[in-house]
Image (spheres, coloured by chain):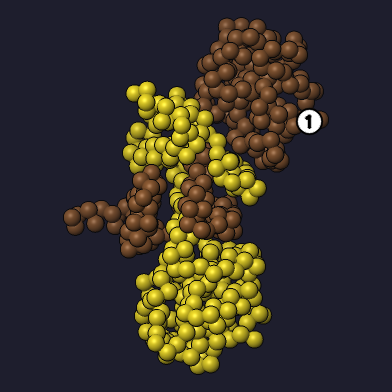
Chain colours: A yellow, B brown
Amino acid sequence: MLKIDIIGRGNVALHLAKAFEGKADTTIVNPRTIEGLRADSDIYLISVTDKAIPEVFSRIKDANGIIAHTSGSTSISLLEREKGRYGVFYPLQTFSKASKPDYSTIPVFVEASDTTSKESLMEAARLFSGNVKEASSELRGKLHLASVFSCNFVNHLWAIADAYLKENGGDFRDLLPLIDETCRKIHSKTPAECQTGPANRLDYPTIELQMQKLDSTPDRQQIYEALTESIIQMHHKIEKRDERNKL
Amino acid sequence: MLKIDIIGRGNVALHLAKAFEGKADTTIVNPRTIEGLRADSDIYLISVTDKAIPEVFSRIKDANGIIAHTSGSTSISLLEREKGRYGVFYPLQTFSKASKPDYSTIPVFVEASDTTSKESLMEAARLFSGNVKEASSELRGKLHLASVFSCNFVNHLWAIADAYLKENGGDFRDLLPLIDETCRKIHSKTPAECQTGPANRLDYPTIELQMQKLDSTPDRQQIYEALTESIIQMHHKIEKRDERNKL
């Protein structure tokens, strides 16, 4: 059985420990004290905030096994060390205390200092995930940026809708069936194919009306405008050019 | 059994017919010819594009039953008529040919010229939906705007992520587990409570890095900036003010 030390106390660390349960010999190590760190583990996963990685690394950098961090936007080069092997083990999912994700569907992106370490990290990932891939630090950074658009920004649009409806006597809960369906659709079609709404059908009267409704909140208006422009640009490049020519 | 004529050939019309199946006596009427319109129906649902509503209305405006449209952003006043009753029957969901929504969860917002008509429209909505509410044209317009943020704009962020990953050798499919979890989370907490990501944790180095990654695509950069600013404003009002004071 692979021996894996998970250094961290956050949600990622806790969920990785759960994901490996019964499949690897894991232990959770407090990142501040490094108490309980085992000398003979195969893999040391540094699962702390991006900022804290260098400090934790400096404390365990003489370990014999592979040292890997689990961050989306941190380069592998931060873990460079002359003698030892190192890498990245990035599970692309959002983890919270209450969540019970299906670990087998979580994509894990691996990068390593050498082929043997890469194989070991991929072997570890395959213990729970059916979707294990190699990714350079560059591609991983791009996946992380794409996930900011797909998850953080998406969630904030919902937060805006929630706040807006609260201010106006509506209830965000009434949007949940629509949101679920919007999310369901992109499993069988590309998001571009699923696009609907006023911007997509170039319904300028509705766009104008909705911009007016937002004029007391400039940040929402700015988001409305930027996204509307971008939808028109993606779906109606020709029409837009035509309209510009008319001016 | 309520007699309902559905005037329209689009997805909303077809799904309404399905939703009423076995629960009301419905017929679908071609909006161009009005062929098959029944003289003695209780309700006439005009389910066409917003632009086409006035023309269809002008053709059926002498009908005895209640005339209602199904649009989110069109005022009830468009259907005003001296003698007859009228209203709005707005199902808040996105409908496509392939979709099989659970009709019982779709919120239906009703508005009418008089109390009796309101009761009839609500009775009709309750035939398939467990979430029937009254909403003024003003609130309905706001619900529609909130749904543009929650559905159209969200889908476009996914389309951007898809395009960006295609350009860089990544695969949008790898984001689906993350997207599903993001959507699942807002069922038990508010979106504001679920917010994560670089902007939410004021991780300026990552924000800076990601802005640089987008500098060849100004429209994406603009969206990134507007949403990042807005997240900081919503979650860190004090910190932001502090920082401004420092300048």
Please rate how many residues cluster around mark 1, counting C-alpha atoms within 10 Å: few if below 14, some from 14 to 19, many from 20: few
Q: Residue at x 44, y 37 (%)?
A: A233
Q: Quadrant of residue B196?
A: bottom left
Closest to the observer: A233 or B123?
A: A233
Q: Amino acid at mark 1?
A: Glu
Q: Residue at x 35, y 60 (%)?
A: B209
Q: Quadrant of residue B119?
A: top right
Q: How many numbered circles are shown?
A: 1
Q: Which residue is mark 1?
A: B21
Residue B134 in the image: state x and y as whole percent. 58, 29
> Which quarter of the rendering shows the N terminus of chain A?
bottom right
Closest to the observer: A39 or B128?
A: A39
Q: Is residue A180 visible?
A: no
> Which quarter of the rendering shows the C terminus of chain A?
top left
Q: Residue at x 55, y 57 (%)?
A: B171
- Say above or below: B174 vs A133: above
Q: Is residue A40 visible?
A: yes
| Chain label for disc 1 | B
- Say above or below: A182 vs A216: below
Residue B175 in the image: state x and y as whole percent. 55, 57
Residue A69 in the image: state x and y as whole percent. 46, 75
Element assignment for label 1: loop
Q: Is residue B127 left or right of residue A28?
A: right
Q: Is residue B225 left or right of residue A6?
A: left
Residue A37 in the image: state x and y as whole percent. 49, 89
Q: Residue at x 55, y 87 (%)?
A: A42
- Say above or below: A148 vs B6: below
- Say above or below: B152 vs B238: above
Residue furthest bottom in the image: A39
